[in-house]
Image (tube, grey):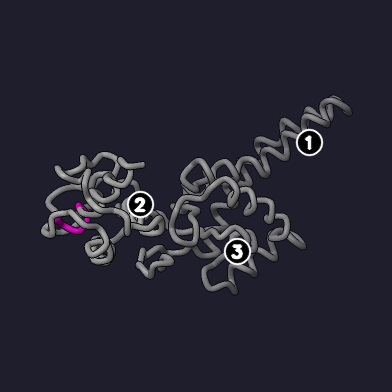
């Protein structure tokens, strides 16, 4: 899959089967949470019904929205099935997009049992239901957690550190970053966040492509700086300047 910059991130979109299993788990969890609310409504026809209605909406729409925006795009069902929700360029999903996606779920559910949503996943090029198309999101396969600690670019000689943990090299304070665009920063940040999930060869290829883009744009870094180290340092230098 490509970012708007044409950089291959090798995201693998989830199919209908794995999405169905994740939805099944989440639906079962939501049912368990709703049952006590229904019991409350049966006890009190006024206050109980009001509480049950509000609670039911929070469970049905609030639970997936919060998970999409604040839990790395993973509901309980997606976590158990190895899936994650991301934006179409591979980034984290914001609250607005998560809310839109889950409100449009009402359309996907029509006429029953997610018929429209399932058909959309089957016929769309990137396995998107209507809510995904409206919100600009994708459900993708996430790499096992153990790969995050072990992933090392061949020849790098070290595990990659997050950009925020990288100390700026001496002299970075006077680097010329004026030609560095917000889009450059966004793509680099997205790659550095996702690199543990990439195949080592793909990771090295993407890092090389991004580094080749930045070397003529950023004035000051040592020309011999390895690709990933350059990306880390440029992002750290940019963050330090606000």
Q: Is residue 10 magenta?
A: no
SS type, badge 1: helix
Question: Image check: 22 left or right of 36?
Answer: left
SS type, badge 3: helix
Which callout, 3 or 2, points at the residue further toward the start of the chain? 3
Q: Nearer the viewer, mark 1 or mark 3?
A: 3
* Nearest the eye: 65 or 231: 231
Q: Which label sits on residue 53?
A: 1
Q: Is residue 209 above or below residue 225?
A: below
Q: Is residue 80 above or below residue 3?
A: above
Query: Which residue position is annotated with label 2?
Result: 189
Which callout, 1 or 2, points at the residue further toward the start of the chain? 1
Circle 1: is it few (<14), some (14-19), or many (20+) Cα within 10 Å? Answer: some
Measured as percent of width and height from the top left, residue 106 is found at 72, 55
In magenta, the rendered stretch is 225-229
Question: Image check: 235 left or right of 36?
Answer: left
Which quarter shows the N terminus? bottom left
Circle 2: is it few (<14), some (14-19), or many (20+) Cα within 10 Å? Answer: some
Which quarter shows the C terminus? top left
Q: Seen from this angle, which residue lies furthest right?
A: 45
Question: Image check: 26 left or right of 143?
Answer: right
SS type, badge 2: helix
Label 1 to label 2, Cα distance in Å? 41 Å
Measured as percent of width and height from the top left, residue 73 is found at 49, 48
Q: Residue at x 38, y 70 (%)?
A: 6
Q: Residue at x 67, y 44 (%)?
A: 61
Which callout, 1 or 3, points at the residue further toward the start of the chain? 1
Q: Which label sits on residue 133?
A: 3
Measured as percent of width and height from the top left, residue 189 is found at 35, 52
* Nearest the eye: 23 or 134: 134
């Amino acid at each position: 899959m490509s970012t708007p910059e044409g950089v291959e991130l090798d995201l693998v979109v989830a199919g209908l089967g794995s999405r169905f299993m994740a939805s099944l788990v989440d639906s079962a969890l939501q049912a368990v949470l709703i049952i006590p609310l229904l019991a409350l409504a049966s006890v009190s026809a006024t206050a109980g019904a009001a509480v049950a209605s509000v609670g039911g909406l929070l469970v049905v729409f609030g639970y997936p929205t919060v998970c999409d925006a604040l839990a790395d795009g993973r509901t309980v069902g997606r976590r158990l099935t190895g899936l994650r929700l991301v934006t179409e360029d591979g980034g984290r999903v914001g609250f607005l997009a998560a809310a839109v996606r889950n409100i449009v779920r009402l359309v996907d559910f029509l006429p029953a049992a997610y018929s429209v949503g399932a058909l959309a996943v089957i016929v769309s090029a990137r396995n998107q239901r209507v809510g995904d198309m409206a919100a600009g999101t994708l459900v993708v396969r996430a790499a096992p957690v153990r790969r995050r600690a072990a992933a090392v670019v061949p020849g790098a000689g070290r595990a990659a550190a997050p950009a925020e943990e990288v100390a700026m090299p001496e002299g970075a304070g006077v680097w010329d970053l004026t030609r560095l665009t917000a889009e450059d920063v966004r793509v680099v940040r997205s790659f550095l966040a996702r690199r543990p999930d990439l195949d080592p060869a793909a990771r090295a290829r993407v890092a090389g492509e991004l580094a080749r883009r930045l070397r003529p744009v950023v004035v000051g870094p040592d020309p011999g700086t390895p690709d990933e180290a350059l990306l880390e340092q440029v992002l750290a230098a940019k963050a330090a300047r606000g």
